[in-house]
Amino acid sequence: MEQAWNTFFLGVQRLFMEAASPFVAISRQAGLELTHAQVWMLFFTLIFVSYAAYFLYVDFMLAQRGRRAVGTVVGIDPGDESADRPIIEFRDQAGRAVTFTSHLGVNGTTGTIGAKVDILFDPLHPKRAREVGRTGARVGYLVFLAFFIGFMIFGTVMAKHAIY
């Protein structure tokens, strides 16, 4: 059984190394000496950096042109490995119902279906909406995201010495 597992694992390892090889070659052409492990870590780090950039972009757009509204908690998203998050519905300026899932976990107010919640939404893209207030939860979310990205960057640098 162990031999079958090792054979399978080595096959998967080869596939990942082959997939990363073009990027290793490109990095060498650019004067960077990246290993296959670093290329994969960099790939996943860039995914999280992109998510953080989009998150901050939405915050910026809401600060520029956001409109306030009152939403109603219509459900709770139980999440898989994350905290429960409120599903909030509100009406945009045209009176259309818009539903979004908050990025923040439920609290005393948003944990109750039917609860009224102040929200801020982008009139050009009403699905871009956030709960108003909850500064501590938002800061905690951003700090965690920054810590995670920092950890991924550290992992990318340290992957140069990875034995796999």
Image (spheres, rainbow, N blue to C red):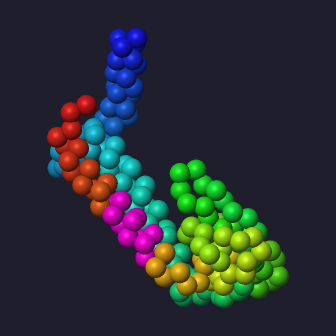
Q: For the stretch drawn in magenta, what is the main secondary structure? A: helix
* Residue found at x 27% / y 38%: 36
Spot occupied by residue 149 in the image (x, y as percentages of width and height): 34, 60
Relative depth, front residue between 76 and 130: 76
The answer to whether 47 is drawn above or below residue 164 in the figure is below
Spot occupied by residue 146 in the image (x, y as percentages of width and height): 36, 66
Spot occupied by residue 129 in the image (x, y as percentages of width and height): 63, 76
* Residue found at x 33% / y 64%: 147
Magenta stretch in the rendered image: 138-149
The answer to whether 9 is drawn above or below residue 104 in the figure is above
Relative depth, front residue between 100 and 56: 100
Q: Is residue 24 visible?
A: no
Relative depth, front residue between 24 and 8: 8
Q: Is residue 73 magenta?
A: no
Which quadrant of the figure contains the C terminus? top left
* Residue found at x 32% / y 47%: 41
* Residue found at x 68% / y 81%: 117
Relative depth, front residue between 150 and 21: 150
Q: Residue furthest front?
A: 108
